[in-house]
Image (cartoon, rainbow, N blue to C red):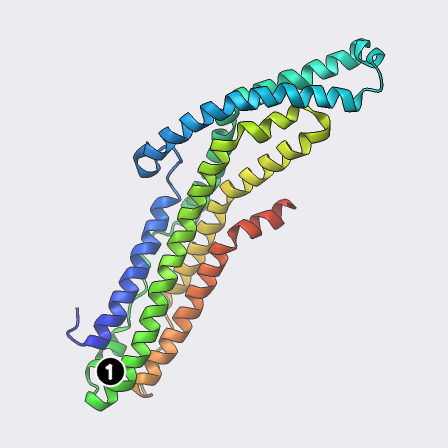
Amino acid sequence: MSDNWVVQNLENALETWNSKLAEIWQLVTHTPETFKGGVIWEVIEKIYGSMQAIGLALLVLFFVVGVMKTCGSITEVKRPEHALKLFLRFAIAKIIVTYGMDLMLAIFKISQGIVSEIMSIANITNSNNSMLPTTMIQTIEDCGFFESIPLWAVTLIGGLIVTVLAYVMIMTVYGRFFKLYLYTAIAPIPLSTFAGEPVQQIGKSFFKSYAGVCLEGAIIVLSCIIFSLFASTPPVVDTGSAAVTQVWKYLGELIFNMLVLVGTIKMSDRVVREMMGL
């Protein structure tokens, strides 16, 4: 690493960005069971078990309410075809609540398969790091004391923005796991609404929303792949301009690409919802 403070500040900021980007590549391959060693998943399983008992109780309640609202009289319930329909609805809802976690994990594995396929097709890893061009480093090191003063201000602001964007990006990806755990823990309650026809839309919306959270991983991976392609072709440095102009233009274009990546990751849930028509 260079002994120049300006260069060190920029390289430290880019190192933070690259480390968080590399962490994302690892996070998208994790499952809820393996994330953080599986400690969180063990707690979620216990919560799910307690919520399942409540879900089964609500299952009966929603079923009774559904029968009362959809049947005009008791004679309709006695009709074999209608009675069979009600029985099948209750049985299917019971199966969904009982095996809800297995069903949700199956949906997550399908989405993870999509993520793995995208990564294998793109054949891009976290090796495409953002780095300062050698010519720019040499230009900065050749600056005198007074020439370095505006560079300090530019690098302080630019380095701070890059660092903040790196942490915002990784927090958004971690937030996806929080949502996955929240959906799984509370799942038996919305799933119990499948027992009643008037409220079954709640269960359908829950499944769609959960599938959307799972598919956010695909949007995150695609965003990182596109950014990696940008990083493989860094901005052109105009060696004929002043050092502060070179750094300003380089950071401006780099930060713009970073803002696009972070913005896309943060809006990944909205992108998926639009794609699924939610």
Q: Quadrant of the N terminus?
A: bottom left
Q: Which residue is mark 1?
A: 139
The answer to whether any part of residue 126 appears in the image is no
The mark total stands at 1
Pick the residue in front: 64 or 248: 64
Asked if 179 appears above or below 219 in the picture, the reply is above
| Residue at x 22% of width, y 79% of height | 138
Pick the residue in front: 254 or 95: 95
Q: Quadrant of the C terminus?
A: top right
What amino acid is found at the position of numbered circle 1 in the picture? Thr
Q: Is 216 left or right of 231, judged from the image as shown?
A: right
Asked if 32 appears above or below 195 in the picture, the reply is below
Q: Whole-percent x and y of residue 244?
A: 31, 84
> Label 1's element?
helix
| Residue at x 27% of width, y 78% of height | 136
Asked if 11 appears above or below 67 in the picture, the reply is below
Q: Whole-percent x and y of residue 192?
A: 60, 25
Pick the residue in front: 238 or 276: 276
| Residue at x 75% of width, y 19% of height | 67
Asked if 267 appears above or below 102 in the picture, the reply is below
**Residue placed furthest toward the left:** 3
The answer to whether any part of residue 223 appears in the image is yes
Q: Whole-percent x and y of residue 269?
A: 53, 49
Residue 209, by quadrant, is: top right
Query: Dot 1: within a 10 Å radius of its alpha carbon, few (fewer than 14), some, or many (20 or more) residues?
Result: some
